[in-house]
Amino acid sequence: MAIIVGKLGISVSEGNTITSRSGIADYNDTGTSVNPITLIADTWTTLTNDGLGAFTNLSYLPSGVTNLMDTSTGSFDFSELNLGDNCFIRNDFSVTPTTNNALLELRYQLGGTGNNYTLDTLLGRLDSGSGKPYRYALAPQMIYMGDLNTKDNPITLQIKLSTNGFVINSGSSIGVVKQ
């Protein structure tokens, strides 16, 4: 058995087969650039992603994985991963509030019916003026496949703004580190 270190992580060679230990996918949205999603004050809103953007890149998926997102809903689909795998998600979206000093929150809704849970974070106050877009594009979040409830159910990305506004979702890039 040979161990090979490459751009996508460590690979293990057994006979004539090389298995990648990690990979990436980038799903860019086109739908919300034409029709932004309306945000209603203090309401969790799901971000959609059609995966049809010009910069969508599925060339470097982990071995054995065909998809990391259900582009009909924009939900993350990690069902082809293994328990113990880690996903680093970098979302890229712009929120335009109608009122200054709006509070923006983000959460992932995970798990199946009856066993659902959320991972929440406060993104902060949008206090540089209303009617202008605030872009969030560089902060990755980690979700690991610690149980089948997380791995085998859709994971939904949602935001909540304390005032009305709208959001344009440019997309999500997903890095997978295999156990």
Image (spheres, rainbow, N blue to C red):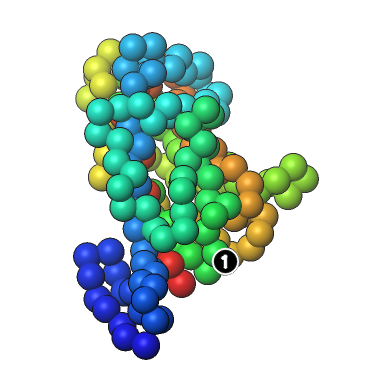
Corner quadrant of residue 102: top left
Relative to 170, 87 lies left or right: right
Residue 70 visible, this orientation: yes
Q: Secondary structure at mark 1?
A: loop
Query: Going by the picture, which residue comes out furthest to the front?
Result: 16
Q: Residue at x 52, y 27 (%)?
A: 72
Residue drawn at x 37%, y 19% is: 32
Of the 4 image quadrants, the one containing the N terminus is bottom left
Determine whether 176 is above or below 105 in the image.
below
For residue 171, say whether it is visible: no
Q: Closest to the observer: 103 or 71?
A: 71
> Mark 1: which amino acid?
Leu
Residue bearing mark 1: 83
The location of residue 126, given as percent across then percent down, is 31, 28
Residue at (29% x, 69% y) in the render:
9
Residue at the (26%, 21%) spot, across then down:
133
Residue 168: x percent and y percent? 34, 22
From this view, report whether residue 149 is shown above or below residue 163. Answer: below
Q: For mark 1, does the 10 Å Cα neighbourhood hold few (<14), some (14 to 19), or many (20 or more) residues?
A: some
Residue 147 as seen in the image, left or right of residue 122:
right
Residue 154: x and y in percent read: 59, 42
Q: Quadrant of residue 21?
A: bottom left
